[in-house]
Structure formats: structure tokens, C-alpha cells
Amino acid sequence: MAVEEPEGSARRRAPRVDAIRNREAIVEAASAVLAEQGTAVDVREIARRSGVGMGTLYRHFPKKEDLVHTVLRKDFSQWAVSARQAAIDAGDPWAALTGFYQQALTGYARHRAIMENFALTWTAPDLEGLQQLRLVIEQLCAGATGLLRPDVTTDDLLLLLVSLGHAVQLTDNCRPEMWHRLLRISFDGLRADHHEPLPADTASITHPPGPDRELRSSKPSQPAASS
């Protein structure tokens, strides 16, 4: 015979359902507001859009930074998975590589908080986010073997993405098409028919620095063999 569940137990569980629903509403609203207004947004606007009180918001996210980090990690992870699958499905390896950058930078232009956060990647590195990017770029590079100049490293391409992200941030309001030109110029220089050796890489982003630690070189560029 089934044992009847105590009434108090059911009452204790009911708020959990509400709490999950409230948290999802907060994250969804925050994602939209952060995309529109960036990280300077007032959390009261997020609470208003999510339909919860400030007390409820702070119970789930005691600090604004906690909420921003949760939202950016979710949005970034969804984008990284989508970009990686697009790379797998692409028939043209060079188009897959350039398309990945186009998609990434277009996304930054539409999501102010991601743009702001990515601009800080080097000074306050998100190791998990960098690793997600690294996996995508390594897969794209493997597919573009023979098309991409052989002395280009994954670190080169990661830094290029961050640099172009800065360009998007600087030009999106006044010259929104400028970064498209810079992307084309950059990828013209990455083609395998460029034989002049790249300057030696004296630092690496494989292990981003802590407050008191210098970058260490893990994979310097190799000079091209002389013909």
C-alpha cells in the first residue's frame, strides 16, 4: 500500500517549482536586456521584465556579476555549439573558417554585453570560454589544411578574433561595415600562398596570465622552410 505523503512535504516542494520558473524568467529577461543595453543595465529593469521582485532576483543572484556571468556563459555556449556544428557541416573548409568569424562578429555586434565581455578576455580571461573557442578553431584549421598558411597557430586565430571584436566595438555605431573590410583583409593574409615567415611568437594565450604571472609561450610559430 502506498504511503501517503505528508502534506508539509508537498508544500515544501511547491516553492521549488516557482523558484525554478522565476530563475528561468530572470535569465531569459537578462539575456534580452544585456543584448540591448550591455552590462551597465540596471538590474531593476531585468526584474521588471522578468515579472519578479528585487528580493526574488537577489535570492537567485546575490550580485549583478553572478547574473551577467550566468547569462553570458549560456548565450556564449549556445553560440559555440551552433558554430561548431556549422563548421562540421560545411562543405568548403575555407568558407567554414571565414563564415565562423563572420558569424561570431555579427553576433557580437548584436549583443552588446557579449561584445563588452569579449573585449575583456585578455585582461580577465574566461578559461572555459577560451577553451570552447579553441576547440572550434582547431577543428576549422584541421579542415583548412593546405589552404591556411602552415605557420599560423590556434593562438594567432584566437587573438585575431578578439582583435576584430575590438574593431566591432569601436566602429559598430559610426561605421558598422568597417569590420567586414578588416575581416577580408585579415583572411587574405592567412592564405597559404603567403610565404614570408611570420614574426616569432614570444607569448601564448594557451594559459592566460593571472594577476602576477606572465604569459608563457607554448607553441611559437615555426619559420617557413626556405626554398
Image (tube, rainbow, N blue to C red):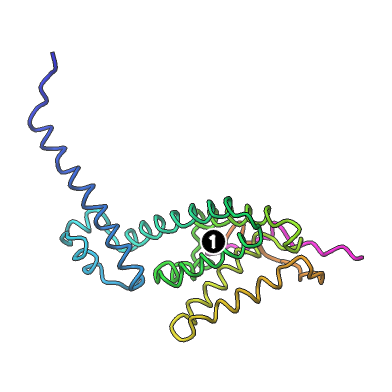
Determine the main secondary structure of the stretch shown in magenta: loop
| Residue ID at (66%, 57%) | 93
Image quarter in which the C terminus is found: bottom right
Label 1: element kind: loop
- State the image coordinates of residue 183 (x, y, percent, origin top left): 60, 74
| Residue ID at (25%, 58%) | 26
Which quadrant of the figure has residue 141?
bottom right
Q: Which residue is mark 1?
A: 210
Q: Depth check: 103 or 168 in front? A: 103
Q: Depth check: 82 or 164 in front? A: 82
- State the image coordinates of residue 173 (x, y, percent, origin top left): 43, 83
The type of residue carrying mark 1 is: Gly
| Residue ID at (44%, 58%) | 76
Residue at the right extreme of this rendering = 227
Q: How many residues crowd around disc 1 within 10 Å: few (fewer than 14), some, or many (20 or more)?
A: few
State how many labels appear: 1
The magenta stretch spans residue 213: yes
> Which stretch is magenta?
210-227
Image quarter in which the N terminus is found: top left
Lateral position of residue 193 relative to residue 120, left or right: right
